[in-house]
Image: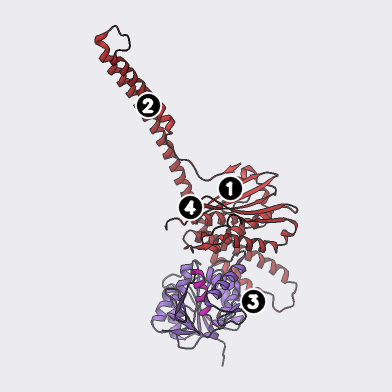
Chain colours: A red, B purple
Amino acid sequence: MTVDPRRGRGRVSPRAALLALLPALLGLGLTLLLDNGRLANPVLYARADLATLLLLAGLAVSALLLAGLFWSARQRGTLAEAQARAQEAAAQDRRRFLQRLDHELKNPLMAIRAGLANLAPAGDAPGEDEQPWRSVDDQVRRISRLTADLRKLAELETRPLERTHVDLAALLTQVVDFARDHAETDSRRLNLSLPQAPWPLPPVPGDRDLLLLVVHNLVDNALKFTRPGDTIEIRAFEDGAQVVVEVADTGPGIADSDLAHVWDELYRGQTTLSVPGSGLGLALVRAVVERHDGQVALRSRVGRGTVFTVRLPLKPAPAR
Amino acid sequence: MDTKPRLLLVDDEAAITNNLAPFLQRSGFQVGVAANGEEALAAVAAAAPDLLILDVMMPRVDGREALRRLRQAGNWTPVILLTQVGEASERAMALEEGADDYLNKPFDPHELIARIRAVLRRARPGQPPLAAAARLASSRLVFERASRRAWIDGREAALTPKAAALLEYLMTHPDELISRDRLLDAVWGWDYPAGTRTVDTRIAELRRVLGDDAAQPTYIETVPGQGYRFVGQVEAAR
């Protein structure tokens, strides 16, 4: 199954418009025939009137058909626009909510961290009280990380992007090198494929650190959700006016019911609940790519694997 | 006589001051507490503390306004701002308004101790901190804060915005060992999963532009396994 976030707009197809014009053309043809007298017509005096009538009838039918076509197209168009607007509004609401949540969590978390620092077991010798303290401290750090990720998401809306020429090939190599240091990587085949001929990958305009985050999150995701023995392929290529980066794996795949939601903030699929993570990694990927005027997409088959695709434009979009 | 440095902790959240003040005391400081900018300014006037820890978002006079009034009155008591939003603009503002350093909430309390010690060590009593200078100079390098431009021997060095922000932070914290995590928090405002690499890449970029040799640094020294240090002598320039 493929999920493409883009939606078509309502428009009148040229074929339908031509078909609608058919009655008018028919009327015109018959009128010409009658006028030229090539049709045997016993009622001569009625010929002119009949011709006019036929022409008018043809034109009227065509006009009605065309009007109907345009009206239904407009309805479809308005519907699509309304849907897009509603989706955008919902996304904005969600981000505003996350921002507020982050703000509300900050001060209590700060107080807890300061309190915990006060309660820290004294001295270097770990005593009996060390274990429970450590466990609480770990959990608080975990929530702190979550709020930090929420802040990233909220900030991405307004943060000014650094626009430089980013060498994606170097960036991908860096991320793969980094991933090879991961413990999980030992048992997975990690392949990086970059074009060399006829020319290497062209640079893309963008924020290097944010694009690094995108690639890192996708590779990290692949490492987390694959099993020992699986293959992870990271490939990049030029496609028209875009550079495409794909992170593909032979992992367990994503259930159809989860596919549409994996990009959502804090969404955790049924099969992923046991895997540690904030549930914000892919939401961040999407947010960064969209800020770069790119697109994300995803193909997956249960039992076969998954491909995450990121498309980034080679030319910067006009400044917003 | 007690020679412990005297801190003024300013935050409207009692839960924070109640927990942070004892922690700071245990760490070897005398601590006074104020609940907003107005109280803080009064406390500074009454008993000049050695350093202020100032929350940004507070009712009445907020931290930013309190800092501005303090600096306008020619008071250069070192200030560490506690920022809330963590946005790049707020971080830039913190330095522009004349804060000596800043931390994003929620932070590791031990990091606050490290910041306090570094700021106190750097402070020259009664004098503006480097963070208040419009132009910074070190050896052949001049950095202009507002425009974020740098010159080497009078020739402009092309810096990306992130490299400029990194250079600014390093130059306003000279001779201070700064961990990669701290740089991420201070300059990027985020922790990155591959963050340490992000910092290393930017430091390499900065060195290339400044023509600095990592083995014999004039400006940025790598402290293996710990972080970076700006080793050049930094002065406010005109």
Q: Amino acid at mark 4?
A: Asp
Per the image, label 4 sits on a secondary structure element best described as: helix
Q: Position of residue B177 (x, y in %)?
A: 59, 80
B202 over B6 or under it: above or below: above
Q: Are marks 4 and 2 in contact (CB under 8 Å)?
A: no
Q: What range is drawn magenta here?
A: B160-174
Q: Are marks 1 and 4 on the same chain?
A: yes
The residue identified by callout 3 is B226
| Between marks 1 and 2 in the image, the one whose residue lies nearer the viewer | 2
- Is B187 left, or right, of B38 in this rendering? right
Q: Mark 1 and 2 residues: CB-CB less than 8 Å, in contact? A: no
What secondary structure do most residues of the magenta stretch adopt? helix
Residue identified by numbered label 4:
A93
What subunit carries mark 2? A
Tag 4 or tag 1, which sits nearer the N-term? 4
Res. A41 image quadrant: top left
Q: Are marks 1 and 2 on the same chain?
A: yes
Q: Chain of mark 3?
A: B
Q: Position of residue A88 (x, y in %)?
A: 47, 49
**SS at circle 2:** helix
Please tell me whether mark 1 sits on a helix, a strand or a loop: loop
Label 3 SS: loop
Find the residue positioned furthest to the left: A45
Residue A236 placed where, x, y %? 60, 54
User: What's the residue type where badge 1 is placed?
Assistant: His
Front label number (3 vs 4): 3
Q: Which mark is residue A261?
A: 1
